[in-house]
Image (cartoon, grey):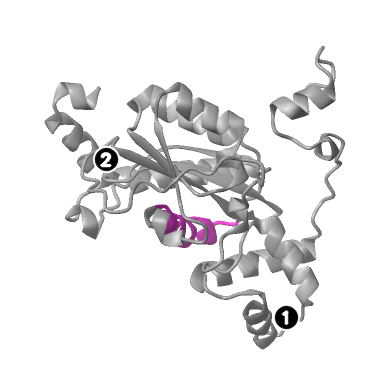
């Protein structure tokens, strides 16, 4: 994303991409094997009991014979992007200088495909390291429209996934995310504005505002990620890709009258007037 040989200075490139100057020169330090093991256990506990804060997580780990200080625990949780669900996941940490948009879905009847899309980012543990997963979901049909994996919490892989979804399925009327800095920066907001998509953002700390994506993350972890210790990023991409094919085409949902997201999404599109489906 940053090109050191480009005619634009690094400072100017950083300004255009909403990156701090310090991040342009930062050399990442590999995470130790001990910390990776602890992060995986933390991720499992958070997925099972998302309401636990750092104190209770420390107690749960202690009951399992794992001793860890609060400061180290808090550092790892920040790196993973997790906090107790009543506060807000740290992958969604807002940028103080970015504009926040209102939540548009409260009281809205969402009953057709491409009316509302939603998206979020999730931490994915691997055998050696971790990555972040971003996915775009059609709210009414639960269908995953596009996704990307990245080793950093930048906005570029999110923009790429949304652009792919738009190229394949058209534009939604409303796009909903949380208030994370990836979604409030100029790259992401500019892309949605370019396509004339109305922007909606969860209320601060209101995880239920994007509840269907939260449920998707739980399914991905219990039905795919925790069953496979991905050896590398390529294996993670392949496994997650296979799972989303299964999720869309074979996994039925009670809320969809025991039908699959693929069935409901494409069948519903067929019944829409041409003007509404365009």
Q: Is residue 1 above or below residue 219?
A: above
Quadrant in which the C terminus appears: top left
From this viewpoint, which residue is outermost toward the bottom?
A: 63
Q: Circle 2 sits on which residue? A: 262
- Tell me the quarter of the picture where residue 143 sits: top left
Q: Circle 1 sits on which residue? A: 66
Total numbered circles: 2
Q: Position of residue 34 (x, y in %)?
A: 78, 66
Q: Position of residue 81 (x, y in %)?
A: 64, 57
Comes first in the chain, label 1 or label 2: 1
Residue 12 shown left or right of residue 183 in the figure? right
Q: Residues within 10 Å of mark 2 (few under 14, many from 20)?
A: many
Residue 41 shown left or right of residue 247 in the figure? right
- Could you tell me if the residues under marks 1 and 2 are in contact, i.e. CB atoms within 8 Å? no
In front: 165, or 13?
A: 13
Q: Is residue 235 above or below residue 64?
A: above
Residue 29 shown left or right of residue 124 in the figure? right
Q: Position of residue 48 (x, y in %)?
A: 50, 72
Residue 40 shown left or right of residue 261 in the figure? right
In front: 4, or 259?
A: 4
* Rendered residue at 78%/61% (across/down): 33
Write the start and end of the magenta stretch as one range.
213-229
Whether residue 225 is in magenta: the answer is yes
Q: Which element type, helix, strand or loop, lies under badge 1?
A: loop
Residue 71: tell me if it is visible.
yes
| Cα distance between the residues tagged 1 and 2 | 43 Å
* Rendered residue at 22%/26% (across/down): 277
The dot on residue 88 is none
* Rendered residue at 74%/70% (across/down): 73
Q: Position of residue 249 (x, y in %)?
A: 29, 43
Q: Main secondary structure of the magenta part?
A: helix
Q: Residues within 10 Å of mark 1 (few under 14, many from 20)?
A: few
């Amino acid at each position: 994303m940053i090109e050191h040989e480009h005619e634009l200075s690094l400072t100017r490139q950083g300004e255009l991409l909403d990156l701090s100057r310090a991040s342009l020169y930062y050399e990442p330090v590999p995470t130790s094997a001990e910390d990776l093991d602890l992060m995986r256990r933390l991720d499992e506990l958070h997925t099972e009991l998302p309401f636990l804060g750092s104190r209770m997580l420390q107690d749960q780990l202690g009951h399992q014979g794992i001793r860890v200080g609060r400061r180290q625990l808090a550092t790892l949780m920040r790196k993973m992007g997790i906090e107790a669900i009543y506060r807000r996941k740290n992958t969604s940490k807002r940028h103080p200088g970015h504009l926040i948009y209102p939540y548009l879905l409260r009281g809205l009847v969402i009953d057709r495909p491409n009316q509302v899309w939603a998206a979020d980012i999730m931490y994915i543990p691997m055998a050696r390291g971790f990555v972040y997963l971003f996915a775009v979901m059609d709210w009414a049909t639960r269908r995953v429209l596009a996704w990307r994996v990245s080793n950093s919490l930048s906005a570029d892989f999110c923009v790429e996934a949304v652009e792919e979804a738009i190229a394949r399925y058209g534009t939604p009327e409303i796009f909903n995310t949380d208030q994370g800095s990836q979604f409030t920066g100029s790259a992401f907001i500019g892309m949605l504005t370019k396509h004339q998509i109305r922007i909606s953002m969860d209320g601060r700390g209101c995880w239920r505002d994007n509840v269907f994506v939260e449920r998707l993350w739980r399914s991905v972890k219990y039905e795919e990620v925790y069953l496979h210790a991905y050896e590398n990023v390529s294996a993670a991409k392949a496994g997650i890709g296979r799972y989303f094919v299964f999720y869309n085409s074979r996994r039925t949902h009670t809320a969809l009258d025991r039908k699959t997201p693929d069935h409901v999404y494409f069948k519903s599109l067929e019944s829409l007037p041409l003007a509404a489906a365009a």
